[in-house]
Image (cartoon, coloured by chain):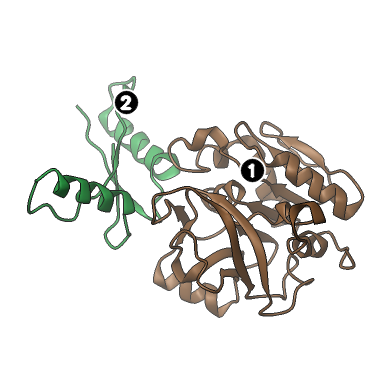
């Protein structure tokens, strides 16, 4: 299972993501720069990490979503390659139209950097198979614009199709997101976006391993 | 081009501004909505083409039409 991490100016969680993928798969991911127009055929998982691409100018993720590499990622996603966007990566995926909705400014207007609880609402995805349905895990968040919003009609369809994968649990919603949504998946089930940072809770030094399951699932190393 | 939030979309920044205006003593201020203005100089003399281009710019980049509306003015 070969993975790739996308790099764009202003993303700053790429090294954490590379460390997590290397630790869990035993193989370092390749890196893909924003101007690249093709992605190697043997890549099975593309990860867009967190950060502040293009300084969050215009809207978070808006500029990054229009870079050449995104067309290459869309082409791969259309062929079934798994794509994971974390934090700014999630914002980029919605701006690119690869996931529904939008991530608005936190209702508190404050940047939040803390640990939350996440309910695994759908454990039957490529990214969550290592968890139990309804399991509540710990996960750190660090963002200013994580307030997920989507119109009522789209939300109803997403709920019917089990596309809401993570919700903030036990009253820990840090940003005012609609229906406590923390992570969503596309209709085809191969593109997941989430605001929390599972890559920062994978080993003892992090204070826990709750985030491992996402990578173990996506990388087909369930035993991790 | 002016980009504003659609009705029904919560605008926490607008709410904060509304509160600040109130604390400055401006009474009777309601429904503050924050938006963006893009001021462009565009080459060409074909007004219809320019308007179509500006509309495409709004649709493709300047506005997120999930939550935002836009208006265009040319002079």
Q: Foreground: A99 or A109?
A: A109
Q: Residue furthest left?
A: B27
Q: Position of residue A152 (x, y in %)?
A: 40, 71
Question: Exactly how many numbered labels are in the figure?
Answer: 2
Q: Residues within 10 Å of mark 2 (few under 14, many from 20)?
A: few
- Give the quadrant of residue A31: top right
At x 56%, y 63%, the residue is A182
Determine whether the residue tagged by mark 1 lies in a helix, strand or loop: helix
Q: Position of residue A91 (x, y in %)?
A: 54, 50
At x 50%, y 55%, the residue is A146
Residue A184 showing in the rendered view: no
Q: Give the CA distance from mark 1 to mark 2.
A: 27 Å
Q: Foreground: A202 or A177?
A: A202
Q: Kindly indicate whether the residues beneath marks 1 and 2 are on one polypeptide chain.
A: no
Q: Position of residue B3 (x, y in %)?
A: 30, 43
Residue B40, numbered label: 2
Q: Is residue A104 left or right of residue A33?
A: left
At x 59%, y 36%, the residue is A67
Reading the image, the residue beneath label 1 is: A71
Residue B71 showing in the rendered view: yes
At x 82%, y 62%, the residue is A216
Marks 1,2: beta carbons within 8 A: no
Chain B: drawing colour: green
In brown, which chain? A
Chain assignment, label 1: A
Q: Position of residue A160 (x, y in %)?
A: 55, 80
Q: Is residue B72 left or right of residue A88?
A: left
- Give the quadrant of residue B31: bottom left
Above/below status of A192 relative to A5 = below
Determine whether the residue tagged by mark 2 lies in a helix, strand or loop: loop
């Amino acid at each position: 299972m070969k993975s790739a991490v996308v790099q764009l100016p202003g993303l700053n969680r790429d090294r954490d993501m590379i460390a997590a993928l290397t630790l869990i798969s035993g193989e370092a991911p390749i890196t893909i720069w924003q101007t690249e127009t093709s992605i190697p055929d043997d890549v099975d998982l593309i990860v867009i990490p967190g950060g502040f691409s293009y300084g969050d100018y215009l809207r978070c993720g808006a500029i990054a979503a229009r870079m050449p590499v995104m067309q290459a990622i869309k082409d791969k996603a259309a062929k079934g390659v798994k794509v994971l966007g974390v934090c700014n990566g999630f914002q980029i995926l919605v701006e690119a139209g690869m996931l529904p909705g939008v991530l608005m400014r936190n209702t508190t207007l404050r940047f939040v950097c803390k640990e939350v609880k996440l309910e695994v609402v759908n454990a039957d995805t490529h990214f969550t198979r290592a968890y139990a349905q309804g399991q509540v895990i710990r996960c750190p968040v660090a963002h200013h614009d994580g307030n997920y919003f989507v119109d009522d009609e789209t939300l109803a369809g997403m709920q019917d199709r089990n596309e809401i994968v993570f919700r903030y649990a036990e009253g820990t919603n840090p940003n005012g997101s609609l229906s406590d949504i923390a992570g969503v998946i596309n209709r085809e089930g191969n593109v997941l976006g989430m605001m929390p940072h599972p890559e920062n809770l994978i080993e003892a030094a992090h204070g826990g391993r709750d985030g491992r399951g996402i990578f173990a699932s996506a990388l087909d190393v369930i035993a991790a | 081009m002016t980009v504003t939030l659609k009705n029904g979309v919560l605008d926490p920044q607008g709410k904060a501004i509304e509160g600040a205006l109130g604390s400055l003593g401006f009474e009777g201020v309601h429904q503050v909505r924050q938006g963006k203005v893009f001021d462009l100089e565009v080459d060409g003399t074909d007004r219809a083409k320019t308007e179509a281009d500006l509309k495409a710019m709004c649709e493709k980049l300047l506005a997120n039409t999930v939550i935002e509306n836009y208006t265009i003015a040319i002079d």
